[in-house]
Image (cartoon, rainbow, N blue to C red):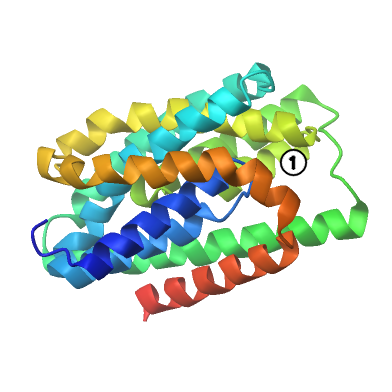
Amino acid sequence: MESLTVAHWSLLAFGALIMGMSKGGLPGAGNLTVAIYALVLEDALGLAGVPLSVGLLLPVLISADVTATIVYRRHAEWKFIARLLPFFIIGILVGWKVFGFFQANDERVSLLKVLIGLILLAMTVMHFTMKWRRNRKGDLEGEQSSRTSLAFGAFLGLLGGVATMLANAAGPVAQLYLLAMALPKYAFIGTSAWLFLIVNVSKVPFMIDLEIITLESMSVSWWMFIPAVIGAAIAPLVVRRINQKLFEGLVWFFIVLAGLRMVF
């Protein structure tokens, strides 16, 4: 990581701050961090930096998750975590094997970069689809049948597990499920925080096996804990003080730009 410049470090720290804020109450913003890390590491290290960016970001995610679970520790709905988690784990196992395939050579790494960009664009579409449904029908009602909600959770859990292993970008998938369960605001944030803390910790051994979490990557990730924790801690204050529609609009605009940059 010796090739990282001051500009690279600054962008990584900014990305970590945004990721922390996304965990603390600004859902969706973290996808911008995924794009920032992939593009910064590619600029610093070439194509080899794209898969490394996924491993570099994971410890940062975990530090923000820990902070968010402390802030919202009383608001988790564990029955929904229990429904999603087994399928997330299966998806992670699938993603682990797929990730290994993409690491084999530069041509496949190029495809991984495109895939990460497509995942970001797909999550953007999913996010705005959810907003459209809420605006059209009001808050989504919970599933009437446990069978239906379990099937829904199984599908989204598998999809989320693969997306989080390949790109650390499963937030909108989990949000879609939790919105469908009609959770109150704080229960929504707390449940999401605990779910992703467990999911992200479970990914660590697989990313070590893929050699995208190393002692060298941790030497960078360690410094990113600070802005990530600050972001998660100040997010509740920021939510109350900023124009959230403007903030979210800008975040998603840059996610789309970054996703298109990675695809093309």
Q: Quadrant of the C terminus?
A: bottom left
Spot occupied by residue 192 in the image (x, y as percentages of width and height) = 60, 34
**Residue 208 appears in which quarter of the rendering?**
top left
Measuring 77% from the left and 33% from the top, which residue is drawn there?
A: 181
Spot occupied by residue 247 in the image (x, y as percentages of width and height) = 65, 64
- In the image, residue 28 above or below residue 43: above
Front-lying residue, 76 or 94: 76
In the rendered view, does 116 fall on the left or right side of 6? right
- In the image, residue 99 above or below residue 201: below
Spot occupied by residue 223 in the image (x, y as percentages of width and height) = 27, 44
- In the image, residue 156 above or below residue 70: below
Q: How many marks?
A: 1
Which residue carries the number 1 mark? 179
Measuring 49% from the left and 24% from the top, which residue is drawn there?
A: 86
Three-letter amino acid code at disc 1? Leu
* Element on which disc 1 rests: helix
Front-lying residue, 252 or 121: 252
**Residue 261 appears in which quarter of the rendering?**
bottom left
Front-lying residue, 127 or 143: 127
Spot occupied by residue 62 in the image (x, y as percentages of width and height) = 39, 34
Measuring 10% from the left and 65% from the top, which residue is drawn there?
A: 3
Residue 110 visible, this orientation: no
Outermost residue on the right side: it is 137
Classify 10 Å Cα crowding around label 1: few (below 14), some (14-19), many (20 and above): some
**Residue 136 appears in which quarter of the rendering?**
bottom right
In the rendered view, does 98 fall on the left or right side of 89? left
Q: Quadrant of the N terminus?
A: bottom left
